[in-house]
Image (cartoon, helix red, strand yellow):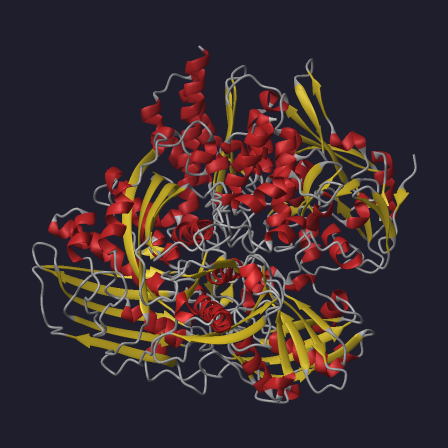
Amino acid sequence: MISPQTVDDALDALSDTPVHRLLAGGTDEMVKLNHGAQLRQFETVISLSRIPELSMWTLDTAGRQITIGAAVSWSQLTEAPFVEHVPVLAQAARTVGSPQIRNAGTIGGNVATASPAGDGLCALVALDAMATVRSTRGTRRVRVAELTTGPKRTNLEPDELIVSLDVPLTHGFQGYTKVGVRNAMVISLAGVALVVDDDRQSVSFALGSVGPTILRSPAAETVAANVLFGGTHLGDAMSQLAAAIRKTARPIDDHRSTAAYRRHAVGVLATRLIERALISRGASQ
Amino acid sequence: MTDVIVDERDFELTINGARVPVRGAAPGASLLQVLRDQLQLTGTKGACEEGECGSCSVLVDGVLMCSCLVMAASVTDTAITTIESVARPDGSFSDVQQAFVDCGAVQCGFCTPGLVMAVTDLLNQQPHADRETVREALAGNLCRCTGYGRILAAIDQVISQRAAQ
Amino acid sequence: MTDLQLPPRQRDVLGTSPTRPDAPAKVSGAFAFSSDLTADGAVWGATLRSPHPHARIVALDVSGALAIDGVRAVITAADVPGRNAYGLIESDQPVFADGIVRFVGEPVAAVAAADPTTCQRALDAIVVTYDVLPPLLDPEAAIDPGTASIHPHGNVVRHQRIVTGDPSVVGDVVVEGEYEIGMQDQAFLGLEAALAIPDPDGSGVELHVATQWLHEDRQQIAACLGLPEASVRLVLGGVGGAFGGREDISLQVHACLLALRVGRPVRMHYSRTESFLGHVHRHPARIWMRHHADRHGTLVNIEARFVFDGGAYASTSSAVLINAVTHTQGPYRCPNAVVDGYAVRTNHLPCGAMRGFGVVQACFAHESQMDRLAAACGIDPLDIRRRNAMVTGDVLITGQPVTSVAPVLRCIDETEALPLPTQPVGGDDHPFGRPGGAGLTSDAGNIVRGIGYAVSIKNLMYSEGFDDFSTARCTVDDGQVALKYATAEVGQGFVTIAEQIARSILGLDEVSSETIDTTVGSAGSTSASRQTWMSGGAVEGACRAVRDRLLSDIASERGVEPGRLEVHDCDVVDVVDGWRQPVREAVRGRSFSEEFIHRHRPTVRLNDLGQGECHTAFAFAAHRAVVDVDVDLGLVKVVQIATAQDIGRALNPMSVIGQIEGGVAQGLGLAVMEEIVQVDGVIRNPSFTDYLLPTIADMPPVEIAMIEEYEPESPLGAKGVGEPPTISSTPAIVAAIRDAISQAYPMARPLTRVPVRPHDIVDAISNSR
């Protein structure tokens, strides 16, 4: 096992070891190993646990963004003051697994795992987060939504490392909500993240667990922007909003739920988030 | 800076304050496997292999983790705390352990070591945790026997005892 | 001599809640669960399982596995020296598949190797060629005589009718419904594990295993090993919960076979995934019922049909079915009934015992029906239950009179009287109090509160003529009491109760329990809510026998009639002249050992019309559920459960509370989240990520009223308390959900299946928005 102590060393290790397994929080990789996936011959484990720069987030007030190291844990994101900066991500982080999982699991790992049910991933897509991806060949900045290409699939090259995630600081309501069959420690059957940018008068909706990747819903975003910024009455727009969300959804039937339910649920969740946005605006005015 | 290279079969861990050698671990073995099979520290239990039950909870540098999700070779530079160290140095029980005994929080007992770890950690950080904080903090520790009622009673006992001191 | 009156010392006798003897070891991590056991030179065992629900094994090549360094043995059906079949009621399940596999997960081979990793490589190297056969997955098709049998014993494990009175009676009010119960898993936390140690000369084996019934295991194992029972010794390894799932053989025979083959101790541990495949589950069931009542709501006739999917092998399916059909009426009088029940084989996972044992399924159906009947009659749901509540002396549809104490009315009244939750609808501001919990799913305005009730009857102990007994030995040596029994302590607390019994009867406080193993007679299974009654009765009998010998010795020494001597608290007392001596002193230098076998009164097998006194005794319970439902998303948060339970007598109040709270949690699980999902015969959720157990965030407070009416038929006046909490909690929760839904959508279709999934609720209201 190689435990690099800097990102540069980690990139060297990635490029030097053709067969490797990247280990951050372990909440996905260890499950595979525990279930009988054995390390291949000559497979090198590269542990990211000793790289301090990956485990911090930094606030850039002037640039109005937060840079989150890829190995920042969910627990770090549920603590003050992060919660005030990016509520949607904090709320998503708090719904992940259990305290033990949140202490271990990392936001970078959530992106790299690319589960359509990823709570953090859903929030990041709503935030239009940018990932900084590095290798010894160079650095690229890519939207998180473009990094994930399908269920558990990304366009990361084997020698690439997600180093950090840039999240904009916005004025306006943010919220994440999901449906699970249990009150805690549950994978979402449907999840919705909403980010309202009062300055740009824009709205973004990201939908989880209803497609091969996290989905955005431009049609619903337009409807919602009209409600929040265009004076459209909510009552009139509610069913339109839900319909647009449901039209975006491409859910499947599986052992956790049905496609029909998931499609229904994202519509309900989206309208609730808009209601919460209106209430929060009313409260702040 | 140089990389830290750890031999995945033979390495050392710091467990309950002591530096202990691990020999002949399976590559990629979890901390849980190493504690139980290599080091005979069987107080830490395993029941799901995927971080969904909390039976294997330990502290890694003071942070509550599921030891089944920690690769043992990746934590050679940390301080690991297991259930075996929770009792006081004189062998008497901690107040959390005693409350579990007193309040009927133990039935089959398989979840108990993990719960003792989680409750100890919670009440050290939040001595006055309210009921909902307790629920959120312990949502990762499944118990199949008790329905959690007596576990909550044990926690109440510790909170009130500590408040009275 | 002045009789110094000291306040009575608190003694850990019956009626108190002493510390469990095993609790200190359990809180410190020192308690040895079966998975913690090892022995010098031990190797590991592992099992190869079928990936197909139904297939013929065309070829089985183990040479690749044997060639791996570190592999000690590979065994298959050809290596079973005795009978390649076991089972609790009929021996129909192969130790290893012999030519045919009948469910996904059926053992095909086992390996022994130096470590678990090598075991896994060996399993991967075994090549099995299957000819896949069409699986039988529809229980109704299994009933059809035209369907090809998937097992030499046939597809119908048992068919039982009950006909009583005049089944043609038609009520003024008739309601009918069809109900479905999903497959629940016991999900004990301590996974299957065993350590098998061969005798040095290979003539026998000692098995340390987590089980519910050592002697039954031994009998089945010995038959498969082709050894006399005396050559197989079982020792209880620490048990991490059971709930019925350890009543059947899982890895026992495999571990013994491997140990005998390699001549070394063998450890076998299941993973969680393997555990889902490797033990029996609660039967999924389809139940149709039609209830007839007069216009006042008095039941006049019940028609019912039960179909239980037993999966590939019989296990206890026939007994589970009997429990279901004989509990059709619930705790209510009904003069006429016609019931038809089937337990069938399919290529699903085998099913058998789980807490509630057939009555869980029946109760969900009859309580759903009682609510329908109440609505149809325009009567309050509790009033219709009171109107029909049975009392001691009533005759069941099997013709059996209820001789047990039957405080059904008290259960109902005292449940209703328990305080309702004070928290507002939707809980407080904390998300954990609302449906959806941490997901921040529901706002207060989305939530409707519902209340529902259910009442249950449950038979205690074994039925239908089974020779049900338990054995215990009590030894008193110089004041130290040692109890010996083979009663499996699975977490329920029998060891605590046994020692309380001894203290109460003997007046001695230093009591311990010896190793739980097969060196004493059988205790029967830790199941059917029977051990406090049965093994408690055996311990009581053994302790009484010792006490009688002591009193007799003292009487002859004092030259008085033995009848004058009694044990009062800690003293031997002559009730005539007032002489007294502490028992502790009286037994000094004396030694006694007595064994006692407790049997309950005989029962009979049901006849073709379902008539006969097949059960021993009954216990009753009522549950009230308060739920908050996010109707639009179909999410439920159970806010409170209230229950009054007929327990006879609280021998250990804290244990009673623990059983009730724990049982309710399992009932809640079945109501809203727990289900093994199989598609085309393949389990889709064999993990704790996808098979959801209630967390501490899901479990509400439980308000409890213990109804203590001494049960004269029970040796200690106590009834078993383990199962009732799991039985009527489920239908109470579903009734509460229905109540909430109907407030928001009066025209919604009633829920008829458990677990209630979010989409079930959404579907139920879909046409009524």
Confirm whether residue C749 shows in the render: no
Which quadrant, please, contains the C terminus of chain C? top left
Residue visible at 63% across and 21% down in the picture = A81
Residue C282 image position (x, y, % from top left): 43, 65
Residue B75 image position (x, y, % from top left): 80, 44
A115 in relation to C542, above or below: above
Image-quadrant location for residue C446 = top left
**Front residue (pair C597, C616):** C597
Extreme-right residue of the structure: B2
Residue A245 image position (x, y, % from top left): 43, 36
Residue visible at 67% across and 49% down in the picture = C28
Residue C362 image position (x, y, % from top left): 31, 63
Relative side of C172 to A126, left or right: left
Confirm whether residue B72 shows in the render: yes
C173 in relation to A244, above or below: below
C84 in relation to C268, above or below: below
**Front residue (pair A35, B96):** B96
**Front residue (pair C17, C306):** C17
**Front residue (pair A198, C415):** C415
Q: What is the tally of numbered marks visible in this picture?
A: 0
C152 in relation to B32, above or below: below
Image-quadrant location for residue C603 = bottom left
Relative side of C324 to C527, left or right: left
Residue visible at 32% across and 25% down in the picture = A235
Relative side of C495 to A110, left or right: left
Extreme-top residue of the structure: A285
